[in-house]
Image: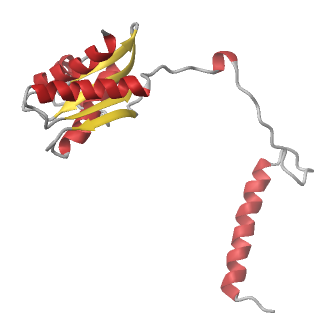
Amino acid sequence: MRLPRTLVATAAAALAVTGITAGAAVTSSNSATADVRTVAVTGDAVVESKRLSSADAMRAASAALAAAEADGAGFVSVSVVDRNGQLQAFVRGENAASHTISASRQKAYTAAAFGSPTSELAKRATGDNAGLKDLPGTLFLAGAVPVKAGEASIGGIGVGGTPSGATDQEYAQAGLDAITK
């Protein structure tokens, strides 16, 4: 049986790539098989990261939205992120505009990354030159508070959607208060 020329060429190319990859894994030039080992890393090489529990993250987000709804501003989005900006909880109020989704998350990450409320950070992120305001994934507008364990920032709560960043930040603070009091 003869194989079509394109199939033979494709198979030869695949074998060549596999051979190169396998050759890189071989620990000895005389070895026909790769010596693959699993090594456990322990001690100072391992860093533990703290973050909110999923229940507390959701409680904070829900409390922030409830505070906004109590003021007639239920058209906000609330994000709770860990220190690295990974989303832990999110709620979107009725009629919240789509831009509030990313704004709340970026504000939350900014507060988490810098360990300060974004209203304070916004004052530092000014000027025409490159600076803090240019960091990807950040938003230097009022509306978020950090979540801390002791002095260490472990997350952030961000709110987006009201006409005032100061009001957004009040709601974020209500979310923080729900898990710290």
Residue placed at 30% from the left, 23% from the top?
Answer: 60
**Near-viewer residue (132 or 149):** 149
- Mark yes or no: residue 181 visible: yes
- Quadrant into which the N terminus falls: bottom right
**Near-viewer residue (125 or 77):** 77
**Near-viewer residue (3 or 87):** 87
Residue placed at 35% from the left, 33% from the top?
Answer: 89
Image position, residue 117 (x, y; %) = 24, 18
Residue placed at 27% from the left, 28% from the top?
Answer: 62
Image position, residue 84 (x, y; %) = 41, 29
125 left or right, relative to 10: left
Count of labels in the image? 0
**Near-viewer residue (152 or 4):** 152
- Quadrant into which the C terminus falls: top left
Describe the colour scheme in one phrase.
secondary structure
Task: Name, please, the residue furthest toward the bottom.
Answer: 1
- Whether residue 105 is situated above or below residue 122 in the rendered picture: below
68 left or right, relative to 2: left
Residue placed at 25% from the left, 29% from the top?
Answer: 107
Image position, residue 66 (x, y; %) = 19, 27
- Mark yes or no: residue 130 visible: no
- Whether residue 118 is situated above or below residue 162 in the rendered picture: above
Image position, residue 38 (x, y; %) = 77, 36
Quarter of the figure with residue 21? bottom right
Quarter of the figure with residue 78? top left
